[in-house]
Structures are given as structure tokens and as C-alpha cells.
Image (cartoon, helix red, strand yellow):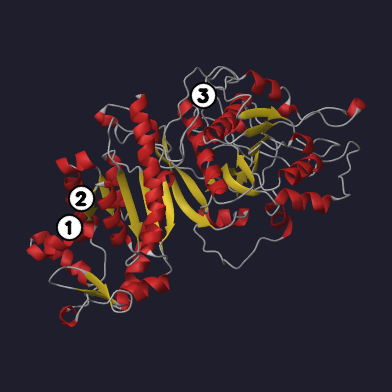
């Protein structure tokens, strides 16, 4: 039986040797956050014990890139047949000057020329099947190597469309700055395809209802493409969905899902906004000299990150490498920003990598403080006033005290280096938890690991604070809001239902945990990941060779999966989606 450990187990050695101090506490299955490769943060100091001396430079924009000076845009766009992908590509290429590389156009040119490779491709295209990887890959990589692409940048239209194609680009260290995915309902796609008509003279595409030809002369020469029948369209849709699922993990760090079931101008407005932000970020970095100038590193963050493919490996190595920490900091930041930009105001982050698990002897308070600082400085850099809050002592007299995890936390925050821009005291302030801490000028509240203690409950103060904050975002970082026994050892019962309901009102925007066999903490079997607004993604850890490993995507869940669902996924069983968790896990998973 597998368990999704709430404790991210680490040892002082590699994942190939047992942990130094296994926990004796059983762990309930819970969901994990899957995060993708993120550009490095600008941390310019030493990782001393506790991290209190680390110097952090504020992050600037949501889209982060590593590129050489003057590097042009590199964009990928994906979408099912008739999703409007071609139209958006034309608009992107026209405004930003990138070279539009369409695998469909390349293949059709080969077919028209009657080449050997074109004739092979024609057989697949006419039957509604996708052309094999080996036929497409050589053409695309050749095109990417040409001079105009290197100077102007590129827009890959519909490529890669399979895991094999994505891996071929990864091996060449070719990665996009951004990956757009157009989403359109199946019934709309089918209608668009079946009504589509081609002008063989000009190559222009029309639609019998949505975009009819200008005159009768054009109308008389229009033809239906062989692959635009309803049966073939449905077949292509199924193939597309199956293939795109396999490449999501490769580009999830730079992926943006776009609602394509809107007017083309509205769709492009969203894409245009994201690309302008990305382009601006490149220009800022180019001026400040922060770009990597080695052409061999254009697509490569680091050899270690490049091999992660979505989840860092060797998580049982303590202390974590700087790259691993930065990876999770950026991952949490992007998920949180997306949630806030989407209007969410009550959020929580649950990340349980080993250094952020207070139940393990490898827990490092400095890692938690560093994560909080990255969040605060990034929001402050966007012009928001941030208040970082740590709960104070609870209880009275001999029972006064606070959770051990938070002891000294406020002092650490006060003595940390918050940069040279004067953010601390102006855009960033430190406070405690309670309604009295809410001030008119505050924009966002970040609460550091709020938690109940024996005989004391933080939820009353927390609720008063969120009520006073009203519409302003409140972010809980690694909260522990479940009920704990009172000082007499008896569970507090008065108001318990209301407390649990309030705790459940915070929406998870980021979640990450590791998976182990039940009752053990070694070896790591996999991970469960969720990053707002995407689904929960379940991964299996696979040993590739001595001291080498990777994570493979097993399943996706719209909601946090139960332990039973996780076990079934590892065993390859197909579950009834209508079946819901029952009993104690069904209750707990809805609360924590």
C-alpha cells in the first residue's frame, strides 16, 4: 500500500541509501504539487545555516527567462484541429516578427512537391492519422537551424505534439520562452472542421457559416480537405488529446492555457499581453546585464534542472541544492500569482519538501523564511504593500507559549536582508495575526505557518483578520489548522464544525508532497503535485541507472486524489470516476 506522505523524507545521503532518521508517525495520503522547470532567481549570497544572511533581489515579472543579450522570442503554440491556432500564429508573427514554423505547412509543401517524404506523409494525412515523429522531427530541427530563425526568433505551430518530439528538442537544449495551449470544446471543434473549405488556388481557408467566400467564383472552386470529415476529425481529436497529455510536464513551467472559444481578437489580446510582458522582461534584463551571454546556454538553465523534466530529482539529498530550493520558490510564486490575478483572495500553500517539514530533523527554518521573502519581495516589486505575519504567543500564565516551529521566526524575519531597494518598512512590513494588524494601506497578507497549539486555537484571530482584510488576498504558507487536543488531552469540540469549515474555505494554490510505501519513508515512490489553476498530477519515480532517476506522469485528477486512487494509479487500475472517498479519509481529505 502506498501512502502520500505529509512528511517529505530526506536523508543526509542520496536517495540510494536509507534516511538517517525515519519518522515513526503514520502519514495519510494527500496530494502533491507538480512543478515545472523555472528560471533561476537572483539570489546573490551564501546559504549559511538558517539562510538568514541570504541576499535576495526582488523578482520582477510573472514570466521569467534566461537568454542571451538581444535574444528574440521563442514561442510554442498548441491546439486541436480548428482551434484557431493558425489565425493566432499569423497575428503573433505579424506583430512580433518571429518566424512562423508550421509542421502542417512544411508537410503540405513536401506533399505538393511529390517528394518521397511527402508521399509518405500524404498516406497518413489522408487517413486522418498524425504523421510519424521521425518524418517531422528532421524537417523542424533543420528549419530551426537557419539564419532567419536565429535572428528573428521562432513560433512553433503544433510542434512538438508527442513525447518523443518533445524529448528530441530537450536533447538539443531547445526550449520555448512560453507555451500557449488553446482550449476549445469538442463540439465546437467538430463544427469548425466539418464546415471548413479550402481554396486550392490561394490556399485560403473558409467556413460555410462562419467565414463564407467573398463571391460565387471562389465558392465554386472550394474543396473539402480529405481529413475534414466528422469521423476523421473525431479520430484526430482523440489522438491529439492523448499525445498532448504526454508533453504537458515538459512545458508546464512556461505553459499558459488560453480559452480559444472566443473571438480571435479577444484571444489574441490575451496572448499579446503575455508576450509583451515577456518581451519587456527580456529588455530589462538585457539592459541590466543579467542575461547569460554564452550561446551554448540559450536554452539551458543548468544541466541538473534540464534533467528534472518537471520535478527535481535527488530530493533525499540534504541539504537541498540551491537549484532545488530556487525551483520550488519560483514554482510557489507563479502559482500564487496566477491565483491572485484570477481574483482569488483566500489561498494556502502546502509544500512539504524535506527542508520544509518541521517533523523531520532536516527541517530548516531558513528555507521557509527564504520562501516567504521571495513571495513578499515579488509582490512588493509589483507595487503592492505586503504584510508578513507571524502569530504571537497564545494562552495565558503558565500555559502561554507558541508552536516550537515558529519560535524566533519573527526575529529572523526582522534581521534578514531584504535587499537594497528600501522595501522593508515601506512596501514590506512585519506583523502578527489578528484584526488589529489590518491597516488601510496593506495590499496582501502572507501568514507564516499559522497553526493551532495544545489548548489554544489560532482560528479565532485568523478569522477576525481575514474579515477585516475583506477583499484583500490572504496567503497561508504551510498552515496547520486541524484541531489538536486541549491541555486536558480531550479534543476541543465547541465550535469545531465552524472551525473546520473556516479552515476549508482557503483554496490551495500550490501543493507538493512525496509518496512512500505506507509506514516507511524510504525509498521515494513518487510525487503528487498541483499548481493553480491546473490539475493534480501524480508521478512515479523511476530509477534509470545507478544514482540516476526521473519522474513519469501516471495520472491526473481534477480534485485531490484519495489514497485509494493513488494506489490504483500505481497498480494500473481504472477507477470509477463517480466513486467518492468515504469514511475517515473522505472526511479528512475534504478538510486538510
Q: Is residue 116 above or below residue 552?
A: below
For mark 1, give the secondary structure.
helix
Q: CA distance from mark 3 to mark 1?
A: 46 Å
Q: Where residue 408 sits: x, y (%)?
A: 72, 22
Q: Quadrant of residue 468?
A: top right
Residue bearing mark 1: 106
Residue behind mark 3: 56
Camera-side residue of 552 and 338: 338
Query: Which residue is at 41% across, 34% downward?
Result: 39
Task: Tell me the mark number nearer the camera, choosing from 3 and 1.
Answer: 3
Q: Tags 2 and 1 in contact by the CB under 8 Å rule?
A: yes
Q: Is residue 93 left or right of residue 273?
A: left
* Local crowd size for mark 3, using a 10 Å CA cut-off: few (<14), some (14–19), many (≥20): many
Residue beneath the point at 91% across and 38% down = 488
Badge 1 crowding class, 10 Å Cα cut-off, few under 14, some 14 to 19, many 20 or more, is some
Q: Is residue 84 above or below residue 47?
A: below
Location of residue 516 by image quarter: top right
Q: Quadrant of residue 211?
A: bottom left
Res 359 seen here: no
* Residue behind mark 2: 140
The answer to which of marks 3 and 2 sits earlier in the sequence is 3
| 3D distance between C-alphas at marks 3 and 2 | 40 Å
Mark 2 is surrounded, within 10 Å at the Cα level, by few (under 14), some (14 to 19) or many (20 or more) other residues, namely some
**Which of disc 1 and disc 2 is earlier in sequence?**
1
Amino acid at each position: 500500500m502506498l501512502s502520500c506522505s505529509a512528511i517529505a523524507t530526506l536523508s543526509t545521503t542520496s536517495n540510494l541509501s536509507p534516511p538517517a532518521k525515519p519518522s515513526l508517525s503514520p502519514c495519510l495520503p494527500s496530494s502533491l504539487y507538480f512543478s515545472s522547470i523555472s528560471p533561476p532567481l537572483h539570489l546573490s549570497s551564501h546559504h549559511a545555516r538558517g539562510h538568514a544572511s541570504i541576499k535576495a533581489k526582488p523578482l520582477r515579472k510573472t514570466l521569467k527567462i534566461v537568454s542571451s543579450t538581444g535574444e528574440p522570442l521563442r514561442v510554442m503554440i498548441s491546439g486541436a484541429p480548428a482551434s484557431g491556432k493558425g489565425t493566432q500564429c499569423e497575428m503573433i508573427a505579424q506583430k512580433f516578427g518571429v518566424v512562423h514554423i508550421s509542421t502542417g505547412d512544411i508537410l503540405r509543401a513536401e506533399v505538393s512537391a511529390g517528394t518521397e517524404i511527402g508521399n509518405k506523409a500524404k498516406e497518413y494525412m489522408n487517413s486522418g492519422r498524425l504523421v510519424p515523429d521521425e518524418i517531422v522531427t528532421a524537417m523542424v530541427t533543420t528549419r530551426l537551424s537557419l539564419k532567419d530563425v536565429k535572428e528573428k526568433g521562432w513560433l512553433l505551430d503544433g510542434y512538438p505534439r508527442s513525447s518523443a518530439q518533445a524529448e528530441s528538442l530537450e536533447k538539443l537544449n531547445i526550449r520555448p520562452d512560453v507555451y500557449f495551449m488553446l482550449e476549445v470544446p469538442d463540439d465546437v471543434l467538430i463544427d469548425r472542421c466539418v464546415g471548413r473549405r479550402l481554396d486550392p488556388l490561394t490556399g485560403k481557408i473558409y467556413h460555410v457559416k462562419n467565414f463564407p467566400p467573398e463571391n460565387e467564383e471562389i465558392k465554386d472552386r472550394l474543396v473539402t480537405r480529405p481529413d475534414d470529415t466528422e469521423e476523421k476529425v473525431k479520430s484526430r481529436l482523440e489522438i491529439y488529446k492523448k499525445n498532448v497529455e504526454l508533453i504537458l510536464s515538459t512545458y508546464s513551467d512556461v505553459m499558459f492555457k488560453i480559452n480559444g472559444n472566443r473571438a480571435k481578437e479577444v484571444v489574441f489580446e490575451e496572448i499579446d499581453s503575455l508576450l509583451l510582458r515577456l518581451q519587456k522582461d527580456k529588455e530589462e534584463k538585457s539592459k541590466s546585464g543579467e542575461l547569460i551571454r554564452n550561446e551554448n546556454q540559450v536554452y539551458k538553465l543548468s544541466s541538473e534542472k534540464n534533467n528534472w523534466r518537471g520535478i527535481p530529482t535527488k530530493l533525499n539529498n540534504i541539504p537541498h541544492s540551491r537549484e532545488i530550493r530556487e525551483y520550488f520558490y519560483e514554482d510557489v510564486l507563479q502559482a500564487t500569482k496566477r491565483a491572485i490575478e484570477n481574483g482569488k483572495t483566500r489561498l494556502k500553500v502546502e509544500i512539504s519538501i524535506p527542508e520544509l517539514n518541521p517533523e523531520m530533523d532536516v527541517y530548516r527554518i531558513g528555507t521557509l523564511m527564504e520562501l516567504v521573502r521571495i513571495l513578499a519581495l515579488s509582490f512588493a516589486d509589483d507595487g503592492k504593500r505586503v504584510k508578513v505575519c507571524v502569530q504571537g504567543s497564545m494562552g495565558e500564565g503558565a500555559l502561554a507559549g507558541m508552536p516550537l516551529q515558529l519560535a524566533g521566526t519573527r526575529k529572523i524575519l526582522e534581521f534578514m536582508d531584504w535587499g537594497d531597494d528600501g522595501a522593508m518598512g515601506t512596501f514590506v512590513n512585519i506583523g502578527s495575526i489578528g484584526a488589529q494588524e489590518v491597516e488601510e494601506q496593506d495590499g496582501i497578507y502572507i501568514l507564516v505557518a499559522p497553526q493551532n497549539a495544545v489548548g489554544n486555537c489560532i482560528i479565532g484571530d485568523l478569522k477576525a483578520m481575514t474579515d477585516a482584510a475583506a477583499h484583500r488576498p490572504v496567503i497561508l504558507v504551510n498552515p496547520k489548522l486541524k484541531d489538536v487536543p486541549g491541555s486536558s488531552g480531550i479534543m476541543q469540540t465547541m465550535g469545531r464544525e465552524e472551525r473546520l469549515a473556516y479552515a476549508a474555505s482557503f483554496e490551495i494554490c500550490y501543493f507538493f508532497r512525496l509518496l512512500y510505501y505506507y509506514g516507511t519513508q524510504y525509498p521515494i515512490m513518487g510525487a503528487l503535485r498541483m499548481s493553480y489553476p491546473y490539475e493534480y498530477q501524480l508521478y512515479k519515480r523511476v530509477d534509470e541507472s545507478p544514482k540516476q532517476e526521473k519522474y513519469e506522469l501516471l495520472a491526473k485528477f481534477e480534485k485531490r486524489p484519495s489514497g485509494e486512487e493513488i494506489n490504483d494509479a500505481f497498480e494500473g487500475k481504472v477507477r470509477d470516476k463517480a466513486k467518492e472517498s468515504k469514511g475517515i479519509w473522505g472526511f479528512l481529505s475534504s478538510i486538510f
